[in-house]
Every structure is written in structure tokens, then in C-alpha cells.
Amino acid sequence: MSNSALLLKNGSKIAIIGGGPGGSFFAHFASRYAKEAGIDVSIKIYDRKSFCQRGPRGCNMCAGVISENLFNSLEEERINIADFCVQRKIEGYCFQAQDESVVLHHPVPGHISKIVTVFRGNGPLQSEHEGNVSFDDYLLNHVKEQGVEIVFDIVKSFKLPFRKGDPVKVISGDGNPKNEFDADLVVGAFGVNTGMMEKVGNMDFGYKPPKTVRTCQCEIMLSPEHIEKTFGNNVFVFALGKRELKFASITPKADYVTVNLVGRRDLTRKNLIDFLKHPAVKKLMPEKWEIPNDFCMCISKIPITYAKHPYADRLVVLGDASISRSYKSGIESAFNMAKLSAYTAFKNGVSARSFMNGYFKPAKRLLARDNFYGIVMLKINDYISSNRQLANRQVKLVKSTEDTKTASLINEILWNMLTGNVTYKEILIKAMNLRLILKTLPFHPLIWIRKKGGIFSNAK
Ligand SMILES: Cc1cc2nc3c(=O)[nH]c(=O)nc-3n(C[C@H](O)[C@H](O)[C@H](O)COP(=O)(O)OP(=O)(O)OC[C@H]3O[C@@H](n4cnc5c(N)ncnc54)[C@H](O)[C@@H]3O)c2cc1C
């Protein structure tokens, strides 16, 4: 069989498993590159969920912060997030240590940030708004307008072909007999909260899913006035000395705030309740506020490593189920990887070799290497955040009006860590500043060395 059998051509069929950002972005780029190549392909997205539903059933469970880089990339692709999806425009990040807090701003003075918050589904379970505010549904509708077909059904499995030129058989639906569809390319954009990941891992082409941890989130309804007054347009990030937490944040929406906890290990509802009871968190809630008996809550997984071999002839896996930036801007990673893999499929073909060279190797260069620097930065951040004295000192330094140089350097490092605006490597290089390290220590090293000397001299 010639290699041309593994090229997309007029009449080729693409099946995308998953209608989250990874799936919609792939469909967007596939439509664009097909048009540019002058070929007519049909594209189907399968998703078991309808994002018109409220609560976890219609939601891809995340904090819903759209990074500035992604916002700009979407604008370049003429995907302008509709106003009805935007819950709040974010201007700053409030870094809350145990006793002190400070609002961080974009390092370039006067720069107007383009970070926005959204709901992935149609809002929390108890919300009463009219219409559909879902960001994921908005993206699906965008690709529907490009001619992509949306199939609200579950994909049960797919069978890779034995012979090189044959299509992949996609089997969908709960009924009997199941629906079968022959695809020239299957895109696995199924995320990490699905049994599909293990099913594909059990196929024998070498895919190993990323490792994951369970995170915990909830939506708290508050009055818009209270949110405006207390949170304003700031995402709150907490360093409360809780060793089990890697990251804790409260993201303001219009009449809800989204609480997000990511741990070193799997988290449970108990971690969420402990967090909500912390005095620094209670202080942000209205007077006499009690944790509601019933609130929209979910436990969702986040990838902490990347997948192995997320490709085969006529198959590519992307988004969370493949490779993404550690703990940051997962939707932006899904966008970048969808673009890279769709470009590869249309320019170089849909063979395993094309995806390895055109998609996965560059993806690893871009993300996996940077994630290594990310691990170092996150460890430093964990160390500072879990130490009351260090975290408070960090906040005091950013607030300092005497040493403005150090203040703006720490502001910049923290801003970039929290927003994911620049690579972890760039952040680490900035942080390796001797003056900054000496300043961040809660004691002056020279005094400490002198003291040590004193101890030794006393011992003599
Ligand atoms: C606690 C937490 C907070 C986060 N906060 C942010 C944030 O603020 N900003 C940000 O950019 N990222 C954030 N992320 C990451 C972000 O949610 C993911 O990176 C992003 O959703 C990945 O997109 P995806 O399309 O790969 O997967 P998903 O969004 O998970 O989409 C997968 C889709 O596939 C469908 N599916 C699965 N199996 C099947 C099947 N067999 N048949 C049919 N359909 C199927 C699912 O229903 C789902 O719709 C956060 C993640 C977590 C856990």
C-alpha cells in the first residue's frame, strides 16, 4: 500500500472523540486547513455530554480562567468569546498568605489584561440565569458553523485497521446494535475523566495515559455586590501552609465564586470543607456565612505527567489525554496541540510517523521540557507557600515602597507563575537572582553566619 493511502483527501472522514476544547479546536483547525488545501472532508465530533445542562453533568470541570495568551490566539483565529460566556474580566491576582495579602498586577504598568473567566458548562447546578453561558458549547457551535457535525453520543470503542489502507472503525451508542462509522482519521480528545483513556491504553500500539490526581472544586453562590466589593476582578490564590494542597484558588464569576483545590495526592470533599473553614477564607465570605448544605461540587482529575505514544496510523490523541502544561492553562495547551496535530494531518498525512515527527516530538520540546523547569519552580513555590514566615515575607516584599526593584521582580515572577503568561524556563531564570534570593530569606545570611561563627567560637 502506498503512503498516499495515509493522506487526507476529498471525501476523507474525521471522527473526533470528545467535544471539549481539544476536540473543538482540532475541528476548527481541520476545517481551516482543509479549506486552505482545497479539499472537502467531513468532520464529526462525538460527545456524551450536552453542555446546555447545569452542574457537573454538563461541565468539563475547571476553574474557567481563559489565559491572556489563549484569548489573543482565539482572536487571531476570529473566535471572539461571546459576551454572554464571559463571567468576569480579570485584572489582578490576590496572593493571600496566612497573615498578609497583596494584589499582583501585570508586570507592564498600564497593560490591560485580557484574562476572562467562564463556565465550561451551563453554570452551577443551582444557577437560575436564562440562556446558555457554556464556553464549551460556544466552541462547539462555532465549529458547527464551519460545517462540523456534532453527535451527542458516547464512543464505546474503536478498532485500528489491520491493513494499512483500511479505515478505523468507530463504535458508538448505548443501544444494540451499536453505530459503526469508518473514519480515515480518529482524534482522541477525550480528556482524563473517562474510561476511554484506559481502553486506549489497553490497545497494543503503545499509548500509556498520563498519570493524574483528583482535584476538588465547588461553586459558591454570593451576591454580585459582595463579589464586587470583596474579590473585585481578582483571582485569589492562597498560601495557607496546608501541606496537602499544591494550589488553592477562588475565581470570581458574576454571582458565583469557583473554589479550586489541587493536591499532592487525591483530594476529597473533606479537604474542601477544611479549606472553606480556614479563617483567611471565611474572612472573604459575608458576615455569618455558613457552608451551604448543598452546593455544586465535583472531583475531577488533572494530568500530572504526559502520555506515551499518543498516536498510531490514522489516530492522534491530544489535549489532557496526551500532553499539556503542568498545572497551568490546560485549555491553551489543548489549543496549541490541536493546531499542531491538525497541521500535521493535513500537511504530512495521518501515519504514526507523521504524528510522531510533526506533532509529538515538537510538543515534547515545547511542553515536556518546560514542565521540567515547572517542577523546579513549583517546588520552590510549595516550599515558600507552606512556610508561614516565608510566605508573609514574600507578600511584604511585594508591598514594599522602599525596595521597588525587588517588589516588581517578585510581582513579575508570581504573576507569570499564576497566569502562565511565559514559559516556566523564563520564570526560573528570573527567579535565579542572588539579590532576590537573599532578600526572600527571612533572616540575613551574614548575621546567621556570624551567629554560627559565634557558636563555634564559644565552643572552642
Ligand atoms: C481543578 C481544575 C482546574 C482547572 N482550571 C483551568 C483553568 O482555569 N484554565 C485552563 O485553561 N485550564 C484549566 N484546567 C484544565 C482544563 O480543564 C483542561 O486542560 C481542558 O479541559 C482539557 O481539554 P480536553 O478537551 O483535552 O478535555 P476535556 O475538557 O476533559 O474534554 C473531554 C471531552 O470528551 C468527552 N468524552 C470523554 N470520553 C468520551 C467518549 N467515550 N465518548 C464521547 N465523548 C467522550 C467528555 O464528555 C468531554 O466533554 C483545570 C483543570 C482542573 C482539574
Image (spheres, rainbow, N blue to C red):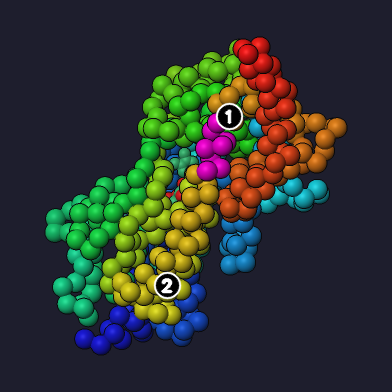
Q: Residue 441 placed where, x, y %?
A: 67, 29
Residue at point 52% right, 54% down? 370
Which badge, 2 or 1, is on the more N-terminal residue? 2
Residue at mark 1: 385
Verify CB contact (< 8 Å) between mark 2 and mark 1.
Answer: no
Q: Quadrant of residue 311?
A: bottom left
Q: Quadrant of residue 89?
A: top right
Residue 379 relative to residue 305: left or right? right
Q: Residue 134 placed where, x, y %?
A: 50, 48
Residue at point 65% right, 40% down? 414
The image shows residue 194, relative to residue 177, as above or below, that is: above
Q: Characterize the local packing of mark 1: few (<14), some (14-19) or many (20 or more) Cα atoms within 10 angstroms.
A: many
Using the image, tell me which numbered label, if any, was put on residue 358: 2
Residue 353 relative to residue 368: left or right? left
Q: Which residues are magenta?
A: 376-383
Q: Residue 184 placed where, x, y %?
A: 29, 74
Residue at point 56% right, 42% down? 377
The image shows residue 185, relative to residue 92, as above or below, that is: below
Is the CB–ligand 1 distance for label 2 below 8 Å? Answer: no
Q: Secondary structure at mark 2?
A: helix
Q: Is residue 36 visible?
A: yes
Identify residue type, mark 2.
Answer: Gly
Q: Which of these two is toward me, 408 or 75?
A: 408
Residue at point 69% right, 28% down? 445
Q: CA distance from mark 2 to mark 1?
A: 39 Å
Residue 140 among those drawn in magenta: no
Q: Which residue is at the far right?
A: 402
The image shows residue 204, relative to residue 347, as above or below, that is: above
Circle 2 or circle 1, nearest the eye: 1
Q: Residue 359 placed where, x, y %?
A: 42, 68
Placement of the C terminus among the 4 image quadrants: top right
